[in-house]
């Protein structure tokens, strides 16, 4: 790990100003992706600006037909929240499946979305639950936020402050974990909304861990709407590595889809 400066932010505004003043600085929340990358010298930020203790970034609350979750809210807090367990059980279940207890005690929603690891869990929830990613300056639809492997629509000095999830009629998440890391080798989030006027009859299916970035599986959503068999998943960008070949990951996605649908 290279040397860096550490700064605890006093507010979102001060953190944004610090990022604007130093193009090499990074924000730190849980650090579950950032710190390992630094340890392996994949990145070398000049400074870390710690957001983890800012109260305005922490918490869960209901906002009419939506639920707001603060960017610095830890996975274990999402998993244990009684309101989310009742209203969006798939989201609470997903948070409880991330990593191990140590990771869930430190990792945060905002950090997961901002880093957009292709095997992270929260991006699938964000897409399936029609989320809006909120920053200190704007509101970004999840459909427009994820741009590929480790790439998002965030500007270099932009900070996620929270996420607003739509409350579905029902939802569920299933994933096949890598036995060592706990990352998804295939994770599928299924959500159903009122069908009137909605694309695919109100169904949304999001997949993580299979390709170079999270994606909506439109063919699966259409099959659910028509109550027909889901066609095989075919992706030119399916991950083919030492952990699993591309065809196997696509096969896992279909199995996880079936498991998620059984859990609805």
Image: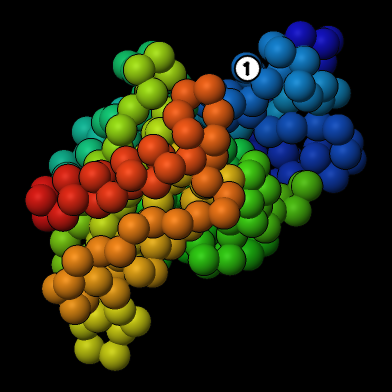
- Image coordinates of residue 250 in percent, x first then y, are 39, 46
Q: Is residue 194 visible?
A: no
Question: Exactly how many numbered labels are in the figure?
Answer: 1
Q: Is residue 143 above or below residue 124?
A: below
Q: Is residue 148 above or below residue 191?
A: above
Work out whether residue 39 or residue 212 is closer to the camera in this orientation and state it. 212
- Image coordinates of residue 88 in percent, x first then y, are 22, 53
- On the image, which quarter does residue 218 sit in? bottom left
Work out whether residue 204 or residue 233 is closer to the camera in this orientation and state it. 233
Q: Residue at x 52, y 46 (%)?
A: 238
Which quarter of the image is occupied by the C terminus? bottom left
Q: Residue at x 78, y 24 (%)?
A: 43
Q: Residues within 10 Å of mark 1 (few under 14, many from 20)?
A: few
Q: Is residue 105 above or below residue 155?
A: above
- On the image, which quarter does residue 259 sit in? top left
Q: Residue at x 35, y 17 (%)?
A: 179
Q: Residue at x 71, y 29 (%)?
A: 49
Left or right of 144, for residue 245: left
Which residue position is annotated with label 1?
Answer: 36
Left or right of 234, for residue 36: right
Work out whether residue 242 or residue 32 is closer to the camera in this orientation and state it. 242
Q: Is residue 130 visible?
A: yes
- Image coordinates of residue 4 in percent, x first then y, are 82, 15
Q: Is residue 159 above or below residue 240?
A: below
Work out whether residue 195 or residue 106 is closer to the camera in this orientation and state it. 195
Left or right of 18, for residue 32: left
Left or right of 184, for residue 175: left
Query: Does dot 1 land on a helix, a strand or a loop?
Result: helix
């Amino acid at each position: 790990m290279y040397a860096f400066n550490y700064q605890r932010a006093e507010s979102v505004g001060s953190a944004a100003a610090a990022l604007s003043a130093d193009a090499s600085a990074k924000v730190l929340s849980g650090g579950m992706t950032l710190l390992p990358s630094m340890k392996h010298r994949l990145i070398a930020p000049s400074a870390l600006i710690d957001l983890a203790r800012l109260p305005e970034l922490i918490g869960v609350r209901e906002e009419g037909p939506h639920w707001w979750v603060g960017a610095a809210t830890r996975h274990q807090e999402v998993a244990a929240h009684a309101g989310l367990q009742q209203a969006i059980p798939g989201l609470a279940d997903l948070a409880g499946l991330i990593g191990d207890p140590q990771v869930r005690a430190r990792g945060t929603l905002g950090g997961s979305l901002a880093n957009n690891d292709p095997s992270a869990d929260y991006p699938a929830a964000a897409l399936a639950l029609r989320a809006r990613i909120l920053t200190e300056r704007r509101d970004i639809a999840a459909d427009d936020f994820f741009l590929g492997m480790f790439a998002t629509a965030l500007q270099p000095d932009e900070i996620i402050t929270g996420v607003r999830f739509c409350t579905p009629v029902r939802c569920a998440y299933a994933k096949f974990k890598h036995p060592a890391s706990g990352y998804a080798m295939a994770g599928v989030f299924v959500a159903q909304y009122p069908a009137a006027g909605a694309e695919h009859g109100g169904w949304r299916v999001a997949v993580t861990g299979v390709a170079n970035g999270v994606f909506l599986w439109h063919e699966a959503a259409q099959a659910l709407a028509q109550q027909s068999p889901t066609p095989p998943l075919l992706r030119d960008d399916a991950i083919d590595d030492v952990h699993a070949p591309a065809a196997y990951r696509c096969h896992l996605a279909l199995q996880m889809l079936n498991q998620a649908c059984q859990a609805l």
